[in-house]
Image (tube, helix red, strand yellow):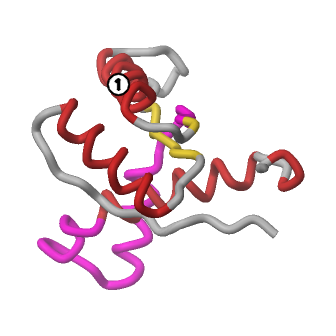
Amino acid sequence: MTLAGDAWVIQCKNIEETAQKIAIEAASRGVFRIVVGLPKNMDGSIGPRAERSTEFAEILRSKCDAEVVLWDERMTTMSASRILKDAGKFGKKRKKTIDAVAASIILESYMGSINPKDTF
């Protein structure tokens, strides 16, 4: 059986501070792997946002003991928006939760791709 922890959103403007907060939270929860969304362009190429995510993953790796995995996040925000719309969440309610729902979709996609025997 494979279990995933909960997803949470940390809002900081500074990439170093964000990585530090995640590292502290991961250590306190005993996290051994962190999945970071990689926002590739629709054609699969790497643009400025994906480069920034890669930079963030490197900073995070330097601040924590957990394995840091980059995972393609194309279409997750659109999927999250659709899920929230179907659930009747609009306006401010949807805006507050869309990142957390997208993070859950990224994690679900990653978890579905791995062999449970390879997780430990």
Q: Nearer the viewer, residue 120 or 74?
A: 120
Look at the image and give the residue range highlighted in magenta: 68-97
Q: Is 70 located above or below residue 2 in the figure?
A: above
Mark 1 falls on what kind of element?
helix
Give the quarter of the figure containing the N terminus: bottom right
Magenta stretch holds residue 72: yes
Q: Position of residue 66 (x, y in %)?
A: 53, 41
Q: Residue at x 56, y 35 (%)?
A: 69
Counting labels gives 1
Specify whether 47 is left or right of 4: left
Q: Is 88 located above or below residue 110 in the figure?
A: below
Q: Nearer the viewer, residue 118 or 101?
A: 118
Specify whether 79 is left or right of 51: right
Q: Residue at x 47, y 69 (%)?
A: 6
- Amino acid type shown at disc 1: Ile
Q: Main secondary structure of the magenta part?
A: helix
Q: Residue at x 89, y 52 (%)?
A: 117
Q: Is 70 located above or below residue 117 in the figure?
A: above
Q: Which residue is mark 1?
A: 59
Residue 84, picture quadrant: bottom left
Q: Position of residue 49 (x, y in %)?
A: 31, 24
